[in-house]
């Protein structure tokens, strides 16, 4: 086992220091419209970003982009254009290697940015990413895993570096963290061949929901004012009361919207993986998997019914399958 661990770490080390893939080029130059949308979204009212006249009389002599927008400009978008790949996909290779060893969960841990200058409308950016380092196996509160650090270099149309970013994630094995340490299943979960579903973060606000599922009940939080809410929370968004109890939902509802996940294929989930936002007949909405229906047969408003499934020993989740409408076979 020690030899296997050393061999795996050596395979990871081979990827450190390599470019993660081709540079990503911004789909659009830095532009006032996107700056305005971003400022509206986060309520940044600095006029040097959005008021040309004010900016012209500032020390900048014109509009500049908020530095914190750095990543926005090179985001690939929902439908990135197809481009021939010149470099190996080292990033994908690294993620597949970690996933295959059971490190299937991921969380961003920290980000450090350094700015060389302000970006201005018309700047055309690209970013090149390098796998800076991959840590040895670490034991964290979330679980056993590896820290992956990436270094991003942002350059303008002249090739000059305008900013850098260090971005670090933790790829870890679900079910191997502090919460699972006392569980007899923890030893099984630590095995590279055993891939478990990610466990929810249990708090005082949502513990009732998971306890209800274990008892075969779909429980919805109900405020003292009578309103139902989901996901659970400490206070009512309407009357702000902190007092609540629960109501057993019928489990009947209709598909409000849905997505079908195809990629990346993360074990132990099966693909294609339909995930729906279901509007329960009580009025609240819940996100869960759809089963018993082909992805291309899913329709808005389709009646569904909840079933509570024990997907792994001791772990129950709600999921929905098509229901027969009254008067129809």
Image: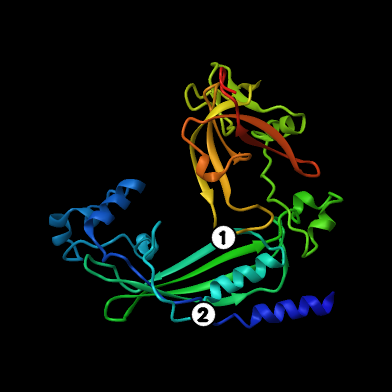
Q: Percent from the top left, x then y, of residue 216?
A: 74, 29
Residue at the spot x=29%, y=50% of the render? 37
Is 241 in front, or is 36? Answer: 36
Image quadrant containing the N terminus: bottom right
Q: Percent from the top left, x then y, of residue 52?
A: 15, 56
Q: Percent from the top left, x then y, of residue 33?
A: 23, 54
Image quadrant containing the C terminus: top right
Tell me: 48 left or right of 94: left
The answer to whether residue 57 shows anywhere in this view is: no
Q: Where 267 falls versus 94 (above or below)? A: above
Q: Check disc 2 and report the residue beneath it.
A: 88
Q: CA distance from mark 1 to mark 2?
A: 18 Å
Secondary structure of residue under mark 2: loop
Tell me: 89 left or right of 124: right
Is 20 in front, or is 166? Answer: 20
Q: Check disc 1 and report the residue beneath it.
A: 264
Q: Percent from the top left, x then y, of residue 156?
A: 30, 75
**Quarter where residue 81 is shown:** bottom left
Label 1 CA crowd tier, 10 Å (few <14, some 14–19, many 20+): few
Q: Where 217 falls versus 224 (above or below)? A: below
């Amino acid at each position: 086992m020690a030899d296997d661990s050393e061999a795996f770490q050596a395979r990871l080390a081979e990827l450190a220091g390599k470019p993660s893939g081709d540079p990503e080029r911004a789909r659009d130059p830095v532009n006032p419209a996107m700056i305005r949308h971003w400022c509206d979204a986060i309520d940044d009212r600095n006029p040097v970003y959005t008021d040309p006249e004010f900016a012209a009389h500032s020390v900048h002599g014109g509009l500049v982009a908020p530095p914190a927008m750095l990543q926005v400009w090179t985001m690939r978008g929902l439908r990135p254009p197809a481009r021939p790949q010149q470099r190996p996909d080292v990033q994908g290779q690294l993620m597949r290697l970690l996933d295959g060893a059971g490190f299937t969960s991921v969380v961003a841990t920290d980000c450090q940015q350094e700015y060389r200058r302000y970006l201005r409308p018309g700047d055309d950016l690209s970013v090149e990413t390098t796998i800076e380092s991959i840590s040895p196996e670490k034991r964290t509160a979330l679980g056993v895993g590896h820290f992956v650090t990436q270094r991003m270099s942002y350059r303008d149309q002249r090739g000059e570096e305008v900013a850098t970013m260090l971005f670090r994630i933790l790829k870890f094995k679900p079910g191997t963290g502090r919460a699972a340490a006392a569980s007899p299943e923890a030893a099984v979960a630590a095995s590279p061949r055993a891939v478990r579903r990610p466990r929810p973060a249990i708090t005082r606000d949502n513990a009732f929901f998971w306890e209800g599922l274990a008892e075969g009940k779909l429980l919805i939080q109900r405020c003292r004012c009578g309103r139902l809410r989901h996901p659970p929370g400490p206070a009512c968004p309407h009357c702000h009361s902190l007092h609540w109890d629960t109501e057993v939902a019928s489990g009947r509802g209709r598909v409000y919207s849905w997505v079908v996940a195809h990629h990346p294929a993360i074990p132990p989930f099966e693909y294609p993986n339909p995930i729906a936002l279901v509007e329960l007949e009580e009025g609240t909405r819940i996100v869960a998997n759809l089963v018993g229906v082909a992805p291309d047969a899913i329709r808005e408003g389709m009646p569904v019914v909840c079933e509570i499934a024990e997907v792994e020993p001791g772990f129950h989740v709600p999921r929905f399958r098509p229901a027969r409408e009254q008067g129809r076979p």
